[in-house]
Amino acid sequence: MRGLKGKNVLITGASSGIGQAIAIRLAEEGCNIAINYHKSSEDAENTEDIAMQTACGNIENCGVQSLVIQGDVSKEEDIVQMVNTVVDTFGCLDILVNNAGIQTECPSHEVKTEDLDRVIGVNLRGAYLCARETIKQLLSQNRPGIIINISSVHEIIPRPMYISYSISKGGMENMTKTLALEYANQGIRVNAIAPGATITPINEAWVNNPQQKAVVESHIPMGRAGTAEEMAAAVAFLASDEAAYITGQTLFIDGGLTLYADFREAWSA
Ligand code: NAD
């Protein structure tokens, strides 16, 4: 896609799932990739290996650089260090993908404050602090840039039993719009994608259970869950010059989930 070659990208939580697919896809497009991971250096290095091999599928992209960085996005000092490391290594940071995310299941009236803080701390506060540090860098170097937030259909669909997650993704919608508006005239575009049910480790409760998976897919108008690669394709588009006039938007990639399958047939004559 136009405008991606040679861009420097930081992807949070890129050692698995959607983040891993984004790292691989952007390397394939010729971006230099910084792979942030929280716990498993092995998974992050595996992501790096696949990404570099994929990039080299095109001889022109064999010079793509990569970096693996440990960091907990709920810790401000880790974020500051992460962004500085990317800038020190690649020279600048052009694109941030706020992908790291967690969820916990619990009736809303029983949620422990520390669990709420943990989910908000990673999904929303962490994403904001990563955006803040990236914007600081961009402004200090007087460069344009791109931020892409990995939100969720639960940005707009309420999710009982997952109140912390719902709050975090709802907040992400406003964060995307607020930052987009505030920095539009400084060449910084801020957008989000909102995946529907996607086959990744976060959904281990149903992805490997055919019966559970069928239940999930029965609610999706297109009749199947999405793949991490389908999410990565949308991120590549939003990060590219093909999306040069798009800012402040959330692109729903959900097989029609947000069309509300229950309304497919009339409820009464
Ligand atoms: P995943 O569990 O594979 O990915 C989440 C990643 O975040 C993991 O690599 C994990 O290590 C990382 N992470 C967790 N805490 C972290 C921290 N403190 N610091 C840094 N990294 C941390 O699942 P996924 O589905 O690939 O999720 C990626 C994003 O997509 C999340 O934001 C999730 O909310 C969003 N999403 C996923 C789905 C889905 O159905 N899979 C749907 C909507 C939105």
Image (cartoon, rainbow, N blue to C red):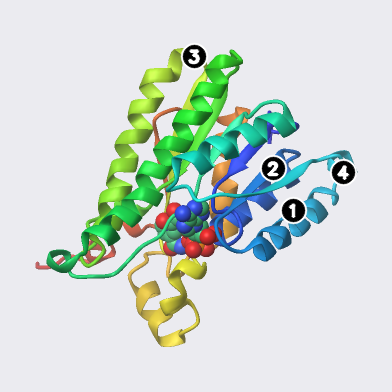
- Per the image, the residue denoted by label 4 is 62
Q: CA distance from mark 4 to mark 3?
A: 32 Å
Question: What amino acid does circle 2 point to?
Answer: Ile
- Per the image, the residue denoted by label 1 is 51
- Per the image, the residue denoted by label 2 is 33
* Whether residue 102 is situated above or below residue 25 in the rendered picture: below
The local secondary structure at tag 2 comes to strand
Identity of the residue furthest to the left in this view: 269
- Mark 1 or mark 2, which has the lower sequence index? 2
- Per the image, the residue denoted by label 3 is 186
The nearer-to-camera label among 2 and 4 is 2
Whether disc 4's CB lies below 8 Å from ligand 1 is answered: no
Query: In percent of the image, x 49 and y 49: which residue is there?
Result: 99
Residue in front for this viewpoint, 43 or 258: 43
To which quarter of the image does residue 250 belong? Answer: top left
Return the x and y of residue 184 as percentages of the image width and height. Answer: 44, 18
Query: In percent of the image, x 55 and y 49: which residue is there?
Result: 71
Q: Are marks 1 and 2 in contact (CB under 8 Å)?
A: yes
Return the x and y of residue 256 as percentages of the image width and height. Answer: 38, 57
The N terminus - image quarter: top right
Mark 4, other Cα within 10 Å: few <14 / some 14–19 / many ≥20: some
Question: What amino acid does circle 4 point to?
Answer: Cys
The local secondary structure at tag 4 comes to loop
- Mark 1 or mark 4, which has the lower sequence index? 1
- Mark 2 or mark 3, which has the lower sequence index? 2
- Mark 2 or mark 4, which has the lower sequence index? 2
The C terminus - image quarter: bottom left
Q: CA distance from mark 1 to mark 3?
A: 31 Å
- Mark 1 or mark 3, which has the lower sequence index? 1
Q: Are marks 4 and 3 in contact (CB under 8 Å)?
A: no
Query: In percent of the image, x 36 and y 62: which residue is there?
Result: 103
* Whether residue 94 is situated above or below residue 141 in the rendered picture: below
